[in-house]
Amino acid sequence: MTIRTTCPYCGVGCGVAVIDGMMRGDPAHPANFGRLCSKGVALKETLELPDRLTKPMMHGREASWNQALDFIAKEFARIRGMHGPDSIAFYVSGQFLTEDYYVANKLMKGFIGSGNIDTNSRLCMSSSVAGHVRAFGEDVVPGCYEDLEEADLVIQVGSNMAWCHPVLYQRLMASREKRGTKIITIDPRRTATAETADLHLPLAAGTDVLLFNGLLVHLVETDAVDRRWIGAHVSGFEEALAIARREAPSVDAVAEAVGVAASDVRRFYDLFARTERVVTLYSQGVNQSVSGTDKVNAILNCHLASGRIGRAGMGPFSLTGQPNAMGGREVGGLANQLAAHMTFAPDDIDRVRRFWNAPSIATRPGHKAVDLFEAIAEGRVKAVWIAATNPADSMPRAGRVRDVLARCPLVVVSDAWPTDTTALADVVLPAASWGEKEGTVTNSERCISRQRAFRLPPGSARPDWWMFAEVACRMGWQKEFSYGGVADIFREHAALSAFENDGQRIFDIGALADLDDAAYSTFLPVQWPCPRPGRGRSGARLFARGGFPTPDGRARMHPLATRAGEVLDDYPLTLNTGRVRDQWHTMTRTGRVPHLMTHITGPRLTMHPRDAARRGIEDGGLAQVESLHGGTILRVSVDDAMRPGNVFVPMHWTDQFSSSGPIDRLVHAVTDTVSGQPDLKGTQVKVAAVSESWSGFLLRRGAGDLALGETVHWSKAPLTAGFAFELSGWTPLAELVDSEEALRRLLRLSEAAELISYSDPKKSVFRYAGLAGGRLEACVFFAAPRTAFPEAGQAARLLGQALEPGARLSLLAGLEPGAVQTGKVICTCFSVEEAAICSAIRSEKLTTPAEIGTMLRAGTNCGSCIPELKKLLARHATQLPAVA
Ligand code: SF4
């Protein structure tokens, strides 16, 4: 039997077909037509991960669902009664299904009576929401994925889509092969996406508004604006142009201000001006900024001024980060929205109040994410329910968020796995996860797809909507929250979208309000708007003929000036945080899949060679990074893909995976004043070299604490048979290996286990291995000074294996002569290592990624490694002797 569901990771929203327990991309899904990226391919491996939360816990003790839910309902009622509705808050997630979101939002805004529900989507795309609302009157993405395939020019702004939206990126690459689409990447980093672009503009961080203001001026000066369209459908053109002219009087002035060659800026502007079919894609590099909303509107201004919107192959296109950030926006999961794209305007409040039969409905917005944790810190919020998200690692100033939660009188956390946030909870509720729950999600192109259950949740885990509905019933609102299942919730959500909506609100899915349970169960992906017949517009593309949902039907161009970010003289570098290819958020799923940890094995700080040299930092060395809010030690990758003055650190690693901890501990809590989105890419930091006196690797069957103290840097990655730790330290190695007891603790060996060793103190080489029943339980290799350990991969293959005397000697001798060396995995889908690719390039004289694919399969599935294959080919091309 085939069960069609949707991938739970990014906003591309790929369909997944589960056939008798096997998984593959769903060829019938309109987002991916059968493709999956490395994360999607590995979904099956995340189903049986250990450590699931399976029972409710109260104050560290197991509880029944009745005990936990009664306690929460009673405490919420007590706190609401004593301190008012705004003393309670929910912080939820773009991982929620729409039905989870709907019930949580209805409970908080309709019945508890506060606007205090916000979501981690605030950190991801709330600037796009605010930009859409300012320009169009409603949060609407005007285009669809096919536009990428029908465009002649695609501009990617602040978006590393090769890694973050890989399947959509591959659709773009495939169409480029056919129609010769020109691609421009605008990003301070030369990302994998930029590597394949026709033109890369490595602009100075935070100068996007100025760059697009310059484009607006250029469009006017080259007569590339559509004055008829503007006259009919747009307001604010003259005001926006006036300020753009002041900001960006000439191409040369723009080039100097954004730090890019004038010839490249001119080429970008000319290409935009003379190409009719232009799509501008943007994501977190635009959104996560103090001026995120302005950046969005600067892009929208250029599309509105040129009339390039809503027609095939043209328009601005915001790529959402999470699988259901869009669904959250639809139900009103952000604190400044009410429900179903309605606001806190009096008419909307009245309409939703009547629909929900909710006399205590909230009448004003609640706290946005960063302010929400401040409100907890100040005691204004006394109870918080955090669901399907991990703010102890992902919020800016994460250390402070932990302190705040530790002091909050009541913290409820629902999640599927233990996290640094569940560790701070008074009540932990076990949540059903992907594959165990039913509902819907909406992807970046407004396409609603089903997530379907194909296995039972472990223990007594339950879906989130059920928990919120149960608490609501126990607080006295049984009639309004007694849902028979998710189909009931979806029908109500769809009906609300259509309620008293005669086309004023574009978000209208009234045609889905009458689906019976069977139709809900089988419904195929559908793009909104999809109103009841004759009640409003529908279509994959919107606004080609204007008709914006504003009082006068016109879109608004906004006058925009560049706003300076934080400048701190003692912190001269700008810290950019973001995603890597094979990881997802705080790694609660992907960090436990061994082969997803083989591409990038630990947290790295990437910096430009000039910045590194100035500080005496070597590639692969350690560095101390400090902001005003905290510091950490990270291993450094020196890479000229970085713009000088900028450093990059992935957002994923937490205290559970590395001594570096979450980088968000260092990130400032400055937000965009319009959207409230945190500036996650603009923290000022300083970086200094740390000299390590030794390095090593540890392999062992169990994870557990290392308890090595603060003078040892470590990161952890799962193996098929255990865990691998990279280690290095800056106190004498002898202190670490001075007793058998300490070594046994490190290796987690029992008294009965056999400890064997090899030491050469003169060369500062120490190797220890522990065996139980003749099988390798653990081993640790140390060397001083810092060294690489190519033998770590070989040793990892021995973990858990029975070792004959010869194999033991071989292990302690360092490596097995002639054994296959392992290294970085480039293609995660087919586990193809860099060494194998380089060897094939050399021996077979391969010159294209397609040839590598034919030979090794690398790059033939999701294709997100193709930029790296090209890099390897280029590296070898420069090394090959010239052909006479
Ligand atoms: S691109 Fe990858 S992570 Fe995103 S939805 Fe598709 S398979 Fe999932």
Image (spheres, grey):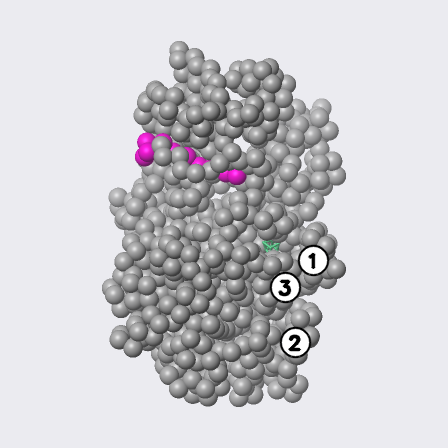
Q: Nearer the viewer, residue 131 or 759?
A: 759
Magenta part of the chain: 709-718
The crowding category of the residue bearing disc 3, from other C-alpha atoms within 10 Å (few below 14, some 14 to 19, many at least 20), is many
* Residue 742 position (above or below residue 643): above
The crowding category of the residue bearing disc 1, from other C-alpha atoms within 10 Å (few below 14, some 14 to 19, many at least 20), is many
Amino acid, disc 3: Arg
Does ligand 1 reach within 8 Å of label 2's beta carbon?
A: no
Amino acid, disc 1: Ala
Q: Nearer the viewer, residue 307 or 428?
A: 428
Alpha carbon distance from label 2 to label 1: 21 Å
Q: Residue at x 71, y 36 (%)?
A: 856
The crowding category of the residue bearing disc 2, from other C-alpha atoms within 10 Å (few below 14, some 14 to 19, many at least 20), is some
Residue located beneath label 3 in the image: 452
Whether residue 445 is visible here, answered yes or no, is no
Q: Secondary structure at mark 2?
A: helix
Ligand 1 quadrant? bottom right
Give the percent coordinates (x, y) of residue 221: 50, 65
Amino acid, disc 2: Asp
Q: Which mark is residue 517?
A: 2
Q: Residue at x 73, y 29 (%)?
A: 844
* Residue 584 position (above or below residue 383): above
